[in-house]
Amino acid sequence: MAELGGQAAPARKAAPAAPRPAPRALAADPVGPETRLRDVGGIAEERARGLARLGCQTVADLLRALPRRYEDQRERVAIRDLIAGRSATVDAQVVQLRARPARARRLTVLEGAVADGTGEVRVVWFNQRYLAARLAPGTRVLLHGPVVLDRSGLLQLRNPQIETGEASGHQVGILTPIYHETQGVTSRWLRFRLPPLLPLADRLPDPLPEAVRDEEGLLPLGRAIRLAHFPESPAARDAARERLAFDEVFLVQLAALRARQRRQATPGVRIPLEAQIAREFVAALPFHLTADQRVAAFEILRDMDRPQPMSRLLQGDVGTGKTVVAALAIRMAVQAGYQAVLMAPTELLVRQHLATLRQLLAPSAIAPRLLLGSTPARQRREVLGGLAGGHDAVVVGTHALLEDQVTFNRLGLCVVDEQHRFGVAQRLRLREKAARMPDVLTMTATPIPRSLQLTVFGDLECSRIRTPPPGRRPVATRIVEPEGRDGAYAFIRAEVERGRQGYVICPLIEAGEPQAARAAVDEFERLRRLVFPDLRLTLLHGRLTPREKQERMARFAAGADQLLVATSIVEVGVDVPNATCMLVEGAGRFGLAQLHQFRGRIGRGADASSCLLLAEPDLDERARARLEALVAHDSGFELAELDLRLRGSGDPYGVRQHGLPEMRVASLSDLVLQERARRAAERVLARDPELRDPRLRRALVDYNTVFELD
Ligand code: ADP
Ligand code: MG
């Protein structure tokens, strides 16, 4: 009877209904997990294209495309107990059914009644005329659908899903799986088409070693997949999803552990820690290093002093003084006769770093060079020559540094300042540029909760700077309700009239940069004409050329403009200590990490700063909780932990941008699972240190983790 359901979906057009699965094709060319879906009998070309849009090319992909959710239709309701306004599952017999044309052309209505021992209820379908032939009076049907009152005040089941006779257990009256859908591929069709393929789930290679499965009490893969599609009970569904979630986390953990092990076995450079040099560097600074900076610097220098390549992550909020620490590492590399690079994601940031490094390295008579995509040819040749010949020791630049023409004489240290993980491909390119794998230090202002550290950065060593330099005042943060907008504008105006500067962050626009830029232009015009006509405003958005951005930032930094209006996409990478106020429009739509990063742009001078979070009128509870967290906490690390708790599921705080593979089942905030998977991965590596198990290897490659295995 499942076939009924299968034909229901495509029946709208007179076009051919879904062809039957062709037993001939199946026999001639047996379908296996690797079979392409369009070669499976019964899956037409067009439908195969729809499936491809959902990420499914092969049978195995389809088996792994799990339901998005389940609709619990298990409870049968006696017809006598039906209530209008609810959906219900009814087990009944057809009393009578007839088709009639409706007023609207080309619409047919099939209507009639079904009955169980307790009563009778009317039922109606639109445009499913073909059902009539199959639903002779007396036929047993299982129906699930909304119960509504019709015009005459009678109860009616409207367009219910249906199974007849011997229920297949795959459509109606179960924990019904609801899938991601696309044109031509409905949940209903999937529920019909999947069951015959489910036995193939047992032929998928199970990446989990049997020992792990036993130790962890997890289901075999095939059974987990079958149950995830058609669970017998909520408990079975949970067990199935637990198993599949475990795989995802386990593979990441295993890859991370393996990558770390591999790196430690790769020959690197050794940059001796010269205490005297460190002391001189620190003594020349105009301030004392904080305790956190000292610890981080020591951890880095100690790593560099080892023959294995360093791969360390330095985490700390904007303004906590990471660059100084990096500068010391660079100083030490140069002392040892190596070259060092500092790479940042935007030209703005690169220029800022260059200025900082020039200052910090001047006492050591080291002159860093600059390399950007926009560097003029002549200058570029000069820089390339200096690096290849080895007479330039330090270069600061964008990803232009990774281009083939850039070669080094003796590269020893690479510092990467970016929010995104320094990818495998980039690392490999770096390795090509050096005789030995250089030490790598990555700096990030996105704190990752400690509990997630092992998942996200399982292959890296981590240092953290928690406490900002003394004398910095926390930014006073307030939530402004929509009616308080004028007051917020008045506050900003007062700051500016005192000689301060400020930022206005435009609301988040999901549609992408072109729309965001347009919206920002509109907002900018509005503010300039109607709100602050007497102030000097400037606008930054992602559609400006790097040159325009740089010019506008420079004007703002120099104090020529008083208010900077920017889209969220724009990295406001300039340190303007005179900027003391910020207004974030539609604050509830931003994530906690992003809001915290915006806020890091102010509070950089000695003066008190204020951040006003303008709440949108329909602010929901979670969004409000995020804003309140921001009001209560200054530390990115605390906010990251809090975000993890606020979410419960989904991708926490800035994790996605670090390039982890997509977790389709697992929730990164499931810490118990993380911990279990980590321990299991450690056990596996202890038993198989080279990771020779071919199934595991293959799974890791397929899973495409960001970690290097070999
Ligand atoms: P980050 O890279 O973490 O955003 P920076 O290294 O750019 O931070 O430092 C921000 C500002 O704080 C710089 O102006 C820097 O000179 C200053 N700074 C860094 N460390 C200290 C310190 N220990 N005491 C006082 N000021 C510091
Ligand atoms: Mg910095």
Image (cartoon, grey):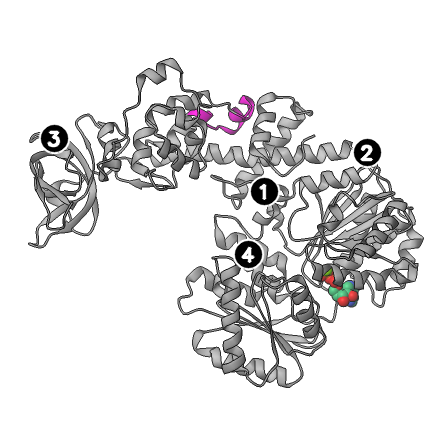
How far apart, in angstroms, are the residues tagged by discs 3 and 4? Answer: 59 Å
Residue drawn at (58%, 55%) of the image: 640
How far apart, in angstroms, are the residues tagged by discs 2 and 3? Answer: 75 Å
Point out the quarter of the image occupied by ligand 2.
bottom right
Residue drawn at (60%, 58%) of the image: 638
Q: Is mark 3 within 8 Å of ligand 1?
A: no
Q: Earlier in the sequence, mark 2 or mark 4?
A: 2
Residue type pointed to by label 2: Pro
Along the viewing direction, whichever of 219 and 203 lies nearer the viewer: 203
How far apart, in angstroms, are the residues tagged by discs 2 and 1? Answer: 26 Å
Pointer 4: residues within 10 angstroms few (<14), some, or many (20+)?
Answer: many
Q: Residue 238 vs residue 383: left or right? A: left
User: Which one is in front in this view, the residue at disc 1 or the one at disc 3?
Assistant: 3
How far apart, in angstroms, are the residues tagged by discs 4 and 1? Answer: 21 Å
Residue type pointed to by label 4: Leu
Along the viewing direction, whichever of 497 and 109 lies nearer the viewer: 109
Picture disc at residue 642: 4
User: Which residue was labeled with disc 1?
Assistant: 660
Q: Earlier in the sequence, mark 3 or mark 4?
A: 3
User: Which residue was labeled with disc 3?
Assistant: 133
Find out whether residue 209 is within the magenta segment: yes
Q: Is mark 1 within 8 Å of ligand 1?
A: no
Q: Residue 32 vs residue 336: left or right? A: left
Q: Position of residue 29 (x, y in %)?
A: 40, 16
User: Which residue was labeled with disc 2?
Assistant: 267
